[in-house]
Image (cartoon, rainbow, N blue to C red):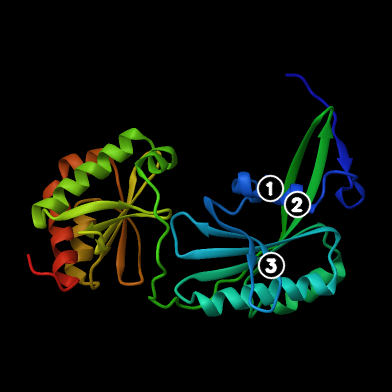
Amino acid sequence: MNTTTFETINLKQHPTLNEKWVQEQIAANPQLLGLGDLILKDKERRQPTAGRLDLLFQDAEALRRYEVEIQLGQTDPTHIIRTIEYWDIERKRYRQYEHIAVLVAEDITSRFLNVIGLFNGAIPMIALQMTALKNGDAVGLIFTKVLDQTQIGQIDDDEESAEVTDRAYWEQRGNKKTMADVDALHQLVKQIDDTLELKFNKFYIGLARDGIADNFVTFRARKKNVLVEARIPRADVIDAMIDEQEISYLEYRENRYRLLLTHEDITAKSEVILDLFRKAYTGSGATP
């Protein structure tokens, strides 16, 4: 195995690698942050009377958003206040999501770690120290979590209008095999109501009738399975059904069962899945 050496770059003093460049690198590859499977929601997001938020990300599999602010050089009080302010504006505007403030800086000093730590009991905040490394003409960014967030309370069940995408987008997020599994699940839905079609949104695949959303069930194609959310009032009998069928069950959240279905599940347990979909359909106020 060959080894190599890297040179640490001070981005604050670099003539061309500026904050905008860092922003573009993170926007293009959110996984650099190490915060999970994130999807870019917005860049330079305008805030009412408060400037612009550098980056806004949404978790691909949860109602969670990350308000990200970037600082070259050392953290300073103004930047910390701005990060918290943007987080507060976003959480008040979109209360259906869990919101986490993310501060990215080259040098997060112990003094400001102490200050951020005081807020962390009430404000979910993550601090990431950013290091730029150079090898020849190649430059890379490393992000080290130096302060983690605490969990916040329950999320409201409001809903924001979804951004429309297409099938190709989801074949890239998942793959053609898991999209075929989504098609199979859609066929189960059509046994209940054959007027419902798939509607491809940025964060989930929903259902629509004549263009009007009816998301009693939603899907997210992944690389190895499909994340299914079924809007059903929680009941012991349904919990027992899921356990008995050995279906992978993530959690019950926001009035929805969150299940991970493999191709084998969809093939072998279609009647059980159809029963769950039917319960979600009737529970949404529709009539089978």
Question: Is 42 located above or below residue 263 in the figure?
Answer: below
- Circles 3, 1 touching at the beta carbon (< 8 Å): no
Q: Residue at x 60, y 47 (%)?
A: 31
Q: Which numbered disc flags the more N-terminal residue, 3 or 2? A: 2
Q: Residue at x 43, y 56 (%)?
A: 61
Q: CA gap, disc 1 to disc 2? A: 6 Å
Taking 1 as reference, is 29 left or right? left
Q: What is the number of the mark on residue 52?
A: 3
Q: Which numbered disc flags the more N-terminal residue, 3 or 1? A: 1
Q: What is the number of the mark on residue 24?
A: 1
Q: SS at mark 1?
A: helix
Q: Residue at x 39, y 43 (%)?
A: 170
* Displayed quadrant of residue 57: bottom right
Q: Residue furthest right?
A: 13
Q: SS at mark 2?
A: helix
Q: CA gap, disc 3 to disc 2? A: 13 Å
Badge 1: few (under 14), some or many (20 or more) residues near its Cα, within 10 Å? few
